Amino acid sequence: MRNIISDPNTSMPIPKFTVEKEIKRIKIVENNYQNNLDSDYTEKIKELDHNFKYEENSKNYWNPPELSLLYGTPFYEVASPSQKIALNHQFWMSNYSLTAYSEMETIDYNLITADCFSALGGNYKILAEQLEHEAVQERVHIHAFFKVNFQILKNLLGKEAFTNNLLENKPANNSQINLQIANFQYHSLRFLSTLMSDKRKHYVSPHLKKLEAKNKLSVTTTNGFFHGYGMLPSSFTRFFASSWGSSPFLASQYYTLRYLANMLLKNQEHTIHLYFKKLQKQGEYIPVPTAISHYHFLDESFHTTTSLFLARDLRKSFPAPTAHEKLLINWAVYVIQKNNLGHISGVIKNRFFGDDLSGMFYIYKVFRSTLFNLSHEEAVQWVEKCFCQEHEGFHQSVKCHQRLQLDIRKLCENLEYLWPINREMRLMASGGTVDKAIRDNIKTFKQFSKLVASAE
């Protein structure tokens, strides 16, 4: 006996699957959702956020030493014990700044795709409820990350950390002409997508329409994972957002991308989780940021389970993807590989996105801050040594990169509609070598040195 889901609003074939498979799949969702509801990890993060004061946590490592900014570089070797603790805190800030912006984007995508699943009706509505609940949790996470990071900047780097004079020397990219071009690109892509998916109008997300009407789509303004850390044109991110909210299959496949982000975070957050457990077992003081990482790791485990289920299992309930749908998900995974995962930096263990110009600017500011008090010339020389000369930090980053690639391939190898270059993460693999990273960094350093000289 088969359970046929019908949709009176469209003539598109709707998923057919046995009652047993439907019950089994929905049961996985229900169990994960209920376990999430029963947990108190989000509430613990909120409490830790409320009570955090940097001065009470300033003398302790928040992560294992190897999760420190500049770990493995020649500069780290000559840093004092107190400076190494500060670099440990800087790593936490760097990691959770990117995480906070990524979670801002996730909130939008969760609600956009939730609309698409709600439109299917029936048992699919529980997916929407779960995604809406996860969005609420993300807001708590974001607040905690920003509060801790603000206090790190204030206490370690001072007022200079809040200025962006160096970046102001970069060519402007927000002129009226560029905005018009971006809008033209977006509307052209959107028009083509609409032609290809005309029968799916019933699934178009009301939440997306509301965000676009108010110009409040976070993915176009933040520098998180899904915006390619600021490297992907806003027209493309807006187009992808509209795509995830236009068909059930594409809505489920947004979670392929979210799973990549989940794995990137888990790749180093699991190490902090183990550090928390070690401190706890030894009866030692647990810094508040360490505890936030620990409970965030546990909270995100539910989200990772959601991503894996939607990306790998739920899509089996839908008709085979159209050529248009295959193209979109492959294009998105290709872009993520190229922009987010195809490079190692050597100064931040888990930093894998391609353009490290912003990384050089940030490290330069760290060197010039009251934390190290280097002159302009000294800071530039150390930036070159850390980014452009081989050291242990690069090799640490390669190991981290390889482990992440293996984790990601476990999912992608099971998605038969992905191109081989995506299924095997070939772009990511090609970017994970020390030689390539140094060659790329040397090119970027030439640009950096010119910009920083003009700003001095």
Image (cartoon, rainbow, N blue to C red):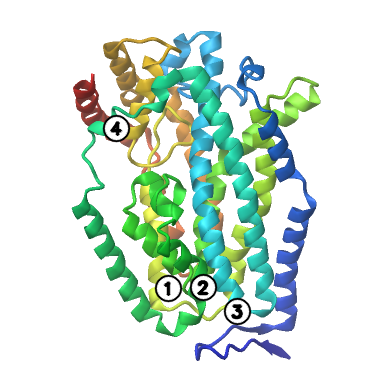
Residue occupying image coordinates x 69% and y 76%: 123
Comparing labels 3 and 4, the label whose residue is closer to the camera: 4
At x 69% / y 39%, what residue is drawn?
Answer: 46
Answer with mark 1 or mark 2, whichever residue precedes in sequence: 2
Q: First in sequence: mark 1 or mark 3?
A: 3
Q: Where is residue 44 in the image (x, y as percent from the top left)?
A: 74, 39
Q: Earlier in the sequence, mark 1 or mark 4?
A: 4
Q: Residue 294 lies in what quarter of the image?
A: top right
Quadrant into which the N terminus falls: bottom right
The residue that disc 3 covers is 120
Which residue does the numbered mark 4 point to in the structure image?
167
Residue at left offset 72%, top offset 24% = 286
In the rendering, at what x and y percent does residue 448 appear? 25, 28
Q: What residue type is labelled 1?
A: Glu
Residue 67 percent coordinates (x, y): 55, 27
**Residue bearing the label numbered 1:** 325
Residue at image location 43% in from the left, 53% down from the top: 219
Q: What element carries label 1?
A: helix
